[in-house]
Image (spheres, rainbow, N blue to C red):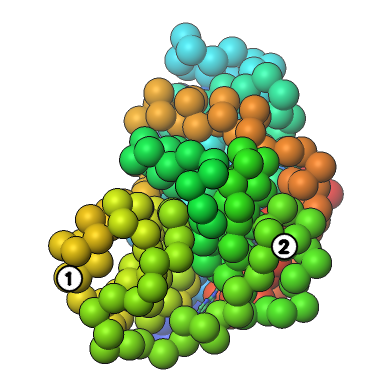
Amino acid sequence: MFKALIVEKDEETGKTAAAVKEISEADLPRAEVTVAVEYSTVNYKDGLCIGPGGGLVRHYPHVPGIDFAGTVEESADDRYKPGDRVVLTGWRVGEAHWGGYAQKARVRADWLVPLPEGLDTRAAMAVGTAGLTAMLAVMALEDQGLEPGHGPVLVTGAAGGVGSVATAILAHLGHEVAAVTGRPEQEDYLKGLGASRIVPREDFAEPTRKPLESEQWSGCVDAVAGVMLGRVLKQMKYGSSVAAVGLAGGAAIEGALITPFILRGVNLLGIDSVMQPYQNRVRAWERIARDLPMDKLEAMVRPATLEDLPGLGADILKGQVRGRVVVDLSA
Ligand code: NDP
């Protein structure tokens, strides 16, 4: 028997409740590889899945946890053998399939990536889905020609998970990073990650009817969307790109016009970590091991246990979590 966070739904009231319970291997879904989970994390989607699911959870009872890292225990697939250290992100694990909030998980071999040299399972989850997405966003901006020295790169939702890792990676690569936050008390934290300056969230709070604003940013990693992305697009430099990863501030791009795309050739790049092909995931994890300073990563970590998850799930949906929550499954 082992511990798991189980979310159950009362079919009569439609209400869900999450609690730590003991389950057995026979309860796990059928798939090729059984992993002893060492660490998982709390992402925005986990907040949704710990609660009523927000349309993400297909079947109850459910084990959330959209990412995890651990050691292979059993494998019916030649690519993995017992003792291999692996990381999993995406593929709707923790949504349609039981995820990482359990001391064991059973998943398809195709969904796993071997841990790259230089990363242990805890560091991999300090990065997690949010950090992988930040790396994919930086790589997408580089593919469009972004290089250090081009001018300030904006990161929105900077004190959150994606924003923290994006800030640290970009600064480490030599970019000047302008970090947008609604939490002024996080200034020291963000400067510690390498941000050159802090931009208050209020600067982007109101939509503008202006077709364009003065050119300021050579690139942007946006985790917020909503009114903020509408304003950011109008401030991008000619030919620059925005890598949009999330919608913490709203599902629409509000107040935006077509003008930044036509008159300034701005590119809006959508980044999704969920269905990333194997080679892309391997490449991104290798870049993370190389380009993310581990001392900065440690500053982002808030440790947690399975028992902490119901409260943390609610906090992340309110935008109140700083950096990355790392859940220790051995605790
Ligand atoms: P976090 O909650 O850790 O961070 C989001 C940050 O956005 C907050 O910390 C806050 O930053 C800011 N924020 C929150 N609410 C608002 C608001 N109403 N207006 C403006 N800013 C706001 O989440 P993550 O970083 O893990 O994820 C961010 C987004 O990216 C989510 O929408 C998530 O679903 C998505 N995502 C997408 C992935 C993909 O593959 N595309 C993968 C991972 C996440 P501050 O306090 O600094 O202002």
Q: What residue type is labelled 2?
A: Leu
As displayed, is residue 135 above or below residue 95? above
Disc 2: residue Cβ within 8 A of ligand 1's nearest atom: yes
Quadrant of residue 231 within the rendered picture: bottom left
Point out residue 177 in the picture as x, y percentages from the top left corner.
60, 56
Quadrant of residue 70 within the rendered picture: top right
Q: Which of marks 2 and 1 is nearer the N terminus?
A: 2
Point out residue 209 in the picture as x, y percentages from the top left corner.
26, 88
- Disc number lying in front (2 or 1): 1
Instruction: Identify residue for label 2.
Output: 190
Mark 1 neighbour density, 10 Å: few (under 14) some (14–19) many (20 or more):
few
Residue 224 appearing in the image: yes
Point out residue 203 in the picture as x, y percentages from the top left corner.
52, 83
Q: Which residue is at a point 44% across and 54% down the rendered structure image?
A: 218
Quadrant of residue 118 within the rendered picture: top right
Quarter of the image for the N terminus: give it.
top right
